[in-house]
Image (cartoon, helix red, strand yellow):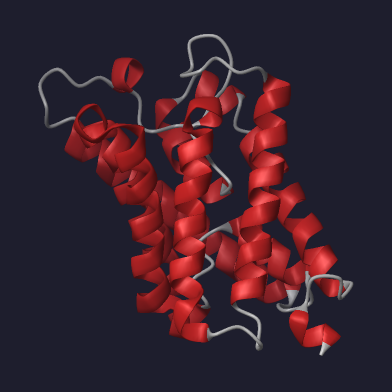
Amino acid sequence: MKKQLAEFLGTFTLVLFGCGSAVIAGADIGLTGISFAFGLALIGMAYAIGPVSGCHINPAVSLGAVAAGRMPLGEAIKYIVAQMAGGIAAAAILLMIAAGKADYSVAANGLGQNGWGTGYLGEYNMYAAFLFEFIATFLFVAVILGATGAAAPAQFAGLAIGLTLVAIHLVGINITGVSVNPARSFGPALFAGGAAIGQLWLFIVAPIAGAVAAGLLFKSGMLDADEQS
């Protein structure tokens, strides 16, 4: 249970501080601040729970590890259950905190949910949203698998992964709000409802597809330094 608890807490932290930065402090810190909130939350958790569970805190990452041959599917399923629970719990807590402000409304202010199309941030279409989430998750998981390989300096893995998440957010917030993580998307969408629920499928399918593609590329040995050596 140590690993599942670590994954729950890690995902909870990522969603609470990442989405919380958008909901509570977005007007003050802007898109750059939100990007760093997600990345710094991940860096902190990487060093806090990385030695316990590997700090996946993302179902796509766990399935990418399965595809790469680094994790059995049964263990990944346990991770995913914990991650989804952490994302839901964080969204619930964030909603309770945000509702403490008199003029807050989840319908008007949102909960940091992902989306696309008319009325959502940059109003990019579904195809642009899917392509971004697929490519961004592919690259994100490629960095994770490379940075956590036996040939990589372990002490820098968390920093490399967290900064990659910052870069992804700097580019992608206006496109989809950036998911690259089904658990991060599911929790806020569950409470925001409406279009967030209707569009949730993309933030499950695209990140998982991108992560699995990266995992398979590593399994083939084409990007795995350990395999080539």
The quadrant of the picture occupied by the C terminus is bottom right
Q: Residue at x 49, y 48 (%)?
A: 167
Residue 81 point in image, percent of width and height: 55, 61
Q: Residue furthest right?
A: 220
Q: Between 2 and 71, which is closer to the camera in this rendering?
A: 71
Q: Residue at x 73, y 24 (%)?
A: 127
Q: Is residue 45 above or below residue 33?
A: below
Would you say 94 lies left or right of 123 here?
left
Residue 90 point in image, percent of width and height: 34, 49
Q: Is residue 70 above or below residue 77?
A: below
Q: Residue furthest top?
A: 118
Q: Is residue 112 above or below residue 86?
A: above
Q: Can residue 148 be seen by looking at this rendering?
A: yes
Would you say 128 lies left or right of 19 here?
right
Residue 136 point in image, percent of width and height: 64, 46
Q: Is residue 225 above or below residue 22?
A: below
Question: Residue 140 falls in which quadrant of the image?
Answer: bottom right
